[in-house]
Image: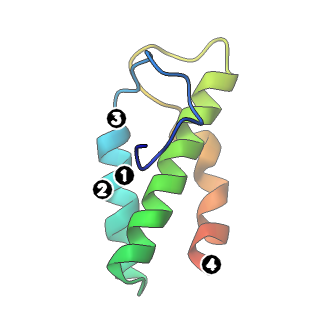
Amino acid sequence: RTLLDDRYQKGMDFHGTGDIFSAACAGAMVRGKGLPDALRLAADFTLACIQATQRDPNAPWYGVEFEKALHLLPGLLER
């Protein structure tokens, strides 16, 4: 199993997820989260971005729609 596990459709490309993951992880650590919690938050947020992109039939091919998952970040930081 991968960190993001099988909750997304395999065989699809999601450009920009590494950038999103690293930014979410760094941001969580700046906000006081330890590394394990920051990694968990980054994985959960990245997955939410992938899922938001999958739900949109008009999603662009060149990246994930992270804007549609931004509202989740405050709740992820509260965990």
Secondary structure found at label 3: loop
Out of 44 and 5, give the one closest to the viewer.
5
Residue position marked by numbered label 4 in the rendering: 79
Q: Residues within 10 Å of mark 2 (few under 14, many from 20)?
A: some
Marks 4 and 2 sit apart, C-alpha to C-alpha, by 19 Å
Residue position marked by numbered label 3 in the rendering: 16
Whether tag 3 and tag 4 are in contact, CB under 8 A, the answer is no
Which of disc 1 and disc 4 is earlier in sequence? 1
- Residue at the location (36% across, 51% down)? 21
Q: In which quadrant will I find the C terminus?
A: bottom right
Whether tag 2 and tag 1 are in contact, CB under 8 A, the answer is yes
Residue position marked by numbered label 1 in the rendering: 21
Secondary structure found at label 1: helix
Marks 2 and 3 sit apart, C-alpha to C-alpha, by 10 Å
Marks 1 and 3 sit apart, C-alpha to C-alpha, by 9 Å
Which of disc 4 and disc 3 is earlier in sequence? 3
